[in-house]
Image (cartoon, helix red, strand yellow):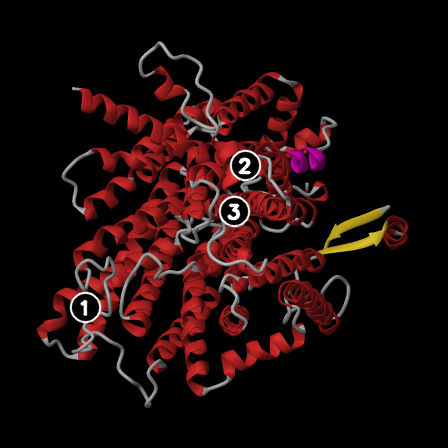
Amino acid sequence: MGTVLTQIISLITTAISFGTVIMYGSLGETLTEKSGHLNLGVPGIMYMGGIGGLIGAFLYETNAASPVPGVGLIIALASALVCSLLGGLIYSFLTITLRANQNVTGLTLTIFGSGLANFFGGSLSKLAGGVGQISVAVTSSAFRATQHLTDGIPYFDEIFCNYGFMVYLAIIIAAVLSFIIKRTSIGLNLRAVGENPATADAAGINVIRYKYAATCVGACISGLGGLYYVMDYIKGTWANDGNIEALGWLAVALVIFATWKPLRSIWGAYLFGALYWLYNFIPGQSRSMQEIFKMLPYLVTIIVLISVSLRRKKEDQPPSWLGRSYFREDR
Amino acid sequence: MIHISKRPDFNRFKGKYAGLNRWTGFGIHLLVRLIGLVLALAVSGVLIYAITKLNPIDVYAEMANGVFGTSRRVWTWLRDLALLLLVAVGLAPAFKMRFWNIGAEGQILVGALATSACMIYMGSANIPTPVFLLIMGIGSMLAGALWGIIPAVFKAFWGTNETLFTLMMNYIAIQLTSFFIPMWEHPKGSNTVGIINAASKAGWFPEVFGQQYMLNIIIVAVITVAMFFYLKRSKHGYEIAVVGQSESTARYAAMNVKKVVVRTMTLSGAICGLAGFLAVAGADHTVSTATAGGRGFVAIIVAWLAKFNPGTMAVISAMLVFLNKGAITIASKFNLSNDVSDIIQGIILFFILGSEFFINYRIQLAHEGKKEEK
């Protein structure tokens, strides 16, 4: 009995820390898609956020005499935000101002971002004249610091308090986004832009400004997913294994699964995490069968995608202008 | 203030272009493209200099040497060019229909899986090579077509978003590949399939005219030309164009839109599947989750930029494969990682995408525009 319980707890904690990476990605993408822009550059932006944070922390740790974890954390956070903002700006300038095709621009951003990240991740320490793999242990320790609230209640701490601060930050961002989109006039305007920019334009909403803001803020949030992955999930190192890209596409899938609702992203992300790692907890699997289990999040997303289109429930539909560019004179 | 207006659709060979005769129009088109390309090379050059402190012109020369230095290198370049072009050609009809098939990556992979399965399970049956190649080709096309039909049916009948559906199908295909790798692994425990039929070479493309990769190039050339005529001259091609322009017009003209969508995606998936056959039987002789290697995504960009014109697709494919191969050469020469090629590729594509705007739209100062209206 005891072992089953520890297994379940272990699955929950694995799911939560894994799910947080894709939750960030999907929250940013949800915001972007609300403005009618399908940004397939999420994996690239997550890469840029991750490598940005890593470069910032690395430069600080190699140049400071005795690096302080808290300072490293702030530097990593700031440089991750700047890098992912850069990705968002490239995408929005091309798709909003220059009206380039969104899918093509997004895919290019993914190629660019993954190239940039893997290049610097693989050769940063070499370029700086050092040897061996890059590691920012000091900064990473600040990201991974946990705060245990209770001691008395069994299992509570293990399940709920065992994570770095970014796990909780993701939940807060989800709640704030949900509130803004649903309850404020900014959110209403944003949804109007995504549903029908021409109508929004006629109503006096500055469509361009909303699109830029949603895409750039969205990119910053997505980029945090990369930062969390690098600093917390793989403990301040780098691996050229393409994992961030796979996680980025999973984040795009999660947007659909959550039917464009930030709050649903929270449990959706944890569910994806649990489905992804389920094979670890079912004994007696062959290596081949483990791979079939990893297919589950994608299969579930397809099923959600199909059922959303079959049921045609109004509140579950994607923004109706999603993927199309808006040009005032085109009307 | 700046005034932006849309240029009329530009056809290089027919009619006039924004009030200019066609050669002036063509000139503007070419000039904008060239400026974009030069700017892209300049930005990449600055980046290269910042990282390596080397003269970018030397680096570009080194790239050219790396790609065209020996005849073997030229043939590998042609082989990879052909493969990328084939995927782009496969995607063209779908995109012309405004069906966003982001799933080429998966369609290539299932095609590659079908080919590998044939090579592994039928390799010792001593089937004559032409027959065996035919079986493998058909198998890969069926697999790719299946991967294309599933999202197409849901799109046609229930309006399911095809961009997201085909994207998810990629990952199903990748996991499926990971599923088969342990079953086919060779040697045991390596977690790779290894070179299939290394000794017997059963199912490998034979040399044609003394060249190992000639068959790849012939197949792709034939399909590219066929696709050109299919899109331009056939009734199907016309239906695809109409559905792409406006579904309601197509319905009004009594076209069966559902049938056109499913049929076109069957074709698109089948050609992408065939690319998997070329990748396995004609090049790698093995299969892994990296067999498609991002070609499915790059080909989308190629097809889109070329406006589905097969000739332009070939030119863009040639440039991208050159960049990729060239960057890998400089990376190994200057001890950098291969990912440099993705950075340069990304920068160049950003500039090409950006330059589209100056081809599609005319920018004037507002008062000039008013004068013209009088």
Q: Main secondary structure of the magenta part?
A: helix
Q: Residue at x 59, y 32 (%)?
A: A70
Q: Is label 2 or label 1 in front?
A: 2
The circle on residue A224 is 2
Q: CA distance from mark 2 to mark 1?
A: 45 Å
Q: Which residue is mark 1?
A: B119
The foreground one among B28 and A257 is A257
Please state which amino acid type lies under the numbered disc 2: Leu
The span picked out in magenta is A207-213
Residue shown at 23%/21% (left/top)? A5
Question: Where's residue A134, x and y in %?
Answer: 50, 51
User: Residue at the front extreme?
Assistant: A65
State left or right for residue B357 relative to residue B331.
right
Q: Position of residue B282 (x, y in %)?
A: 31, 74
Relative to residue B359, is residue B125 drawn left or right?
Answer: left
Please name the amino acid that badge 3 sits on: Tyr
Select label 3 or label 1 by which is in front. 3
- Circle 2: element type: helix
Q: Is residue B178 above or below residue B20?
A: above
**Chain on which label 2 sits:** A
On the image, numbered disc 3 is attached to which residue?
A: A47
